[in-house]
Image: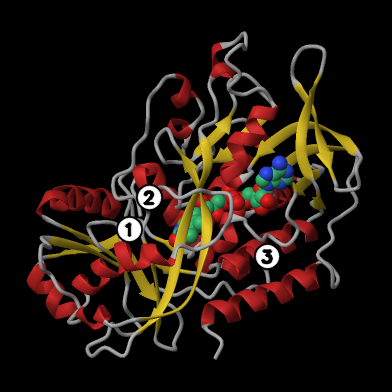
Amino acid sequence: MMRLGQVLRSRALRQIRCLSGGKSHGDVLPQSCDVLIIGGGGMGASSAFWLKSRTQQLGRKLNVLVVERDAGYTSASTVLSVGGVRQQFSLAENIEMSLFGYNFVVNGQKHLGDVDLCYQPNGYLILASAKGAHVLAQNSKLQNELGARNELLGPEALRRRFPWLSTEDIELGCHGIDKEGWFDPWALLMGYKKKARALGAHFSNGEVVGFEWNASGALSAAVVDVGDGVQRPVKFDTCVLAAGPHSGQVARLANIGDPEATTSSLRVALPVEPRKRYVYVFSTQGRNCPGVATPLTVDPDGTYFRRDGLCGNFLCGRSPSDEEEPECDTLDVDHGYFETDVWPTLANRVPAFESVKIQSSWAGYYDHNTFDANGIIGRHPHYSNLFIAAGFSGHGIQQTPAVGRAISELILDGKFSTIDLSRLGFERLVNKQPMFEVNIV
Ligand SMILES: Cc1cc2nc3c(=O)[nH]c(=O)nc-3n(C[C@H](O)[C@H](O)[C@H](O)COP(=O)(O)OP(=O)(O)OC[C@H]3O[C@@H](n4cnc5c(N)ncnc54)[C@H](O)[C@@H]3O)c2cc1C
């Protein structure tokens, strides 16, 4: 039997083929454009969508080109994510971006036309031990003040509401009763692409392998390898760096992070790199099993699980500690990690999970920001025509609507016009002011 995730992926694959006329070929690579976007995942495609739809509203013209090196999106974070949207963050910017993300997803057809984002409004349930209860309560207060809707539940209320849950060592739970759940990231990506294309954006296949500079030292072109052995420059006025987990690597091509650079901001690297994360899909015949309306539940040690479709499957995962980080050279899955690190927590938290059967699994790369595990959004302080949207560290798919809009605001309006994301700019790296998030999942 096909599980829901597979159904969604094959539906999205069909959409890709429809969008590209039966093949996954992109547009012919032009020699120049107004805005070049490096990376056609969620961030790049959303930026293209917002740039084109806002210029149309403003009655302006803008030639937008997205260059993507992996036409089938075989390793893009966007398509390997679990598609969760939650307001359970501690930074106001993340809460506001996620609220906008939720609104965008539930109004997907209004923004993107004929797409089904398969939104599941099941909420999140984040659990805290005595150690984390105070922070959980503090975060919940801010989240509700900003427009989220969640409730704090003590152990007895948790047991009543979720009879399958063991509340051993749990002091408090925060349950999202509205505006939280999950959706199909494939469908969202295809929705952005289809709409951006309909509005006139171009999507070409190719890998950015270098940059060119003009006489005054500004970035003027990207060097693109389309796989035919010839490297072609594509001139641009403005460039958006949205290469996901590989953004740090692409930034280095523009000498960002060069220790010999003459300006201090150019000496600071973009600290974004891939971190491998496993997702396991399992089923259970256990009694008192969590039902179809079960929220995405997060244990105090970071292990999470949620239902996956209607056939009794669950998916789960957990980020390893820094010392346990696996190699990132392949997307192979370590099944031993499930046995030793994930399953013991699951079985402890949900007795029905004492006996489970792994049905499938996959791995994907978090776009990890090693500085403070949050998105880096905005203009580069040295290159005034380079905008960055990278480093979302495992919570980026829900932020793609807000970040794409924010990038379009910076380019078209010269400032953030809706959510003020200045504190998440590159300057915080230069000034060594980390923006840590509590409750990273
Ligand atoms: C297992 C897993 C679970 C996740 N769960 C969630 C979740 O529940 N909720 C949530 O909000 N987020 C989640 N995320 C995180 C989320 O998927 C990412 O933050 C988000 O998708 C990042 O989007 P992106 O466009 O920046 O990166 P990507 O989707 O990786 O896109 C970047 C693109 O750039 C291309 N590229 C790279 N280098 C070049 C180059 N030199 N030239 C041209 N193209 C290039 C790549 O091929 C890629 O397609 C999860 C991620 C993983 C891996």
Q: Where is residue 271 in the image (x, y as percent from the top left)?
A: 51, 32
Which element carries disc 1, helix, strand or loop? loop
Contact flag, marks 2 and 1 (Cβ < 8 Å): yes
Q: Given the image, on which type of amino acid does mark 3 rest?
A: Met
Check whether the beta carbons of the residues at disc 2 and disc 3 lie within 8 A of each other. no
In which quadrant will I find the N terminus? bottom right
Q: Earlier in the sequence, mark 2 or mark 1?
A: 2
Task: Name the amino acid type tagged 2.
Answer: Ile
Question: Residue 119: x percent and y percent?
Answer: 49, 73
Q: Can residue 44 be seen in this view?
A: no
Residue 80 shown left or right of residue 343 in the figure? right
Residue at point 57%, 15% (across, down): 259
Query: How crowded is the residue under tag 1: few (<14 C-alpha within 10 Å), some, or many (20+)?
Result: many
Closer to the eye: label 1 or 3:
3
Q: Distance between the residues labelled 1 and 3?
A: 28 Å
Residue 191 picture quarter = bottom right
User: Does the beta carbon at disc 1 come under 8 Å from ligand 1?
Assistant: no
Q: Which residue in the rendered view is the most extreme toward the front? A: 336
What residue is drawn where x is 62% and y is 55%? 76
**Which one is nearer the viewer's eye here, 278 or 288?**
278
Residue marked by disc 1: 148
Q: Name the residue under label 3.
A: 190
